[in-house]
Image: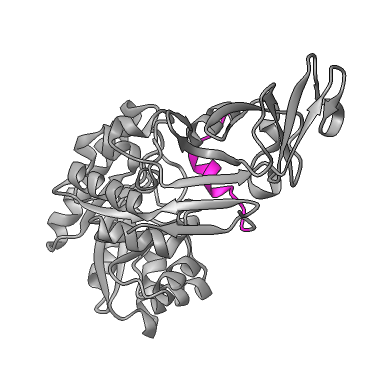
Amino acid sequence: MLRALARVDLSAIERNCAELARVAAPAALCAVVKADGYGHGAAQAARAAQAGGATWLAVATADEAAELRAAGIGGPLLVMGALTEAELSLALRARADVVAWREASVAALAARPDAEGAGVHVKLDTGMGRLGTRDADEATRAADAVAAAPGLRLAGLMTHFATADDDPAFAREQLARFLPWADAVRARHGGDPLLHAANSAATLGIPESRLGMVRCGIAIYGMDPFGADPAAHGLAPALELRSYLAEVKPIAPGESAGYGRRFVADAPTWIGTVPVGYADGVRRALSGDCDVLVAGRRVPVVGTISMDNLTVDLGPDPPDRGAEVVLIGARGGERVLAEEWARRLGTIGYEITCGISGRVPREHAGA
């Protein structure tokens, strides 16, 4: 048994993508595999997503695009993030489409000999307030510049929702700003640049936002963009985090476990030590506020989570040393979802899986 293991079920990613492609149809599905596939493994997730019906892939950085191509991943690929000159060169070598929103940036791109045939997606900022321009006229000028450049393709027109998961009314306001501009640009230049705006939450909750393509990230990994239960959307979690009981010992009333004596027993019990901690991605803020599954039974984490270990209260009838511990996952009728950790931490499921560190080996199965 390994000290810690993140097991990724690629068949779950494939099935999730098939479900999202079904929901989004006739819009195309773009699988977002940035941040090492949200901690699941980018190349492995990309292959599973394509098997499930994703026709596009998206990443945030040029390095991520290059890594996918080096792994033999083909198909349309979009780099969504800002790019320096050096990063732009890398993205173009990876045959990735890029995002622009300023006329001067398009002119600089068009002047590059390595940009011949590059696809450009022009981004209008309709309310996210990050990348893109809020000025529709400026975005139109950028689109005009792309269309006029012999070596470039106007491949897409895009925006990004800020609140699709918790305020769909504002997302619909964003859509109402985006569509007139996008329709006018398409009418101006002909052709058929992809219109895309929807993330996972919008794909599932705002049908009119699906347009020509949806960009799904968290949902392809079987997590709920609304922070509740992925099963409600026909999705299955792909990642399981597990370890084992490295030690089991009795503890008497008044004795403690962990740094700072944050847990002091008030009755006889047994303490189990699990050899994972915050260096593995089990956040210290979960100390005393988290459960794990030990031999299929839900037990509480007690005491302070340290860098390399955490302790659990096994009660009066403990299993033996070596028993399996599931930190995220399901056994029998019990489960601990990433969404549960997120709620306890006041964050989102994305941060949970992205935060599982590189010292935890990944095992990919299925697909």
Q: Residue 7: horizontal and vertical position, in percent? A: 49, 52
Q: For residue 257, say whether it is visible.
A: yes
Does residue 191 show up magenta in the picture?
no
Judging from the image, the colouring scheme is one colour
Residue 306, compared with residue 93, is above or below; it is above
Q: Residue at x 34, y 41 (%)?
A: 200
Q: Is residue 123 in sight in this rendering?
A: no
Position in image of residue 198 (x %, y %)? 30, 43
Residue depicted at 51% across the width and 30% down the height: 340
Relative to 109, is 310 on the left or the right?
right
**355 is within the stretch colored magenta:** yes
Along the line of sight, the residue nearer the viewer: 321 or 181: 321
Q: Residue 140 sits in which quadrant? A: bottom left
Taking the image as shown, residue 87 lies to the left or right of residue 359, namely: left
Q: Nearer the viewer, residue 235 or 98?
A: 235
Q: Quadrant of the N terminus?
A: bottom right
Instruction: Decide: is 89 above or below 167.
Output: below
Q: Nearer the viewer, residue 271 or 262?
A: 271
User: From which residue to which does the magenta span run?
Assistant: 346-358
Q: Position of residue 50 (x, y in %)?
A: 28, 61
| Residue 313 falls left or right of residue 36 | right
Give the percent coordinates (x, y) of residue 364. 44, 59
Q: Residue furthest top?
A: 266
Quadrant showing the C terminus: bottom left
Give the answer, above or below, for where 119 lies relative to 211: below
Residue at the (22%, 43%) spot, across then down: 210
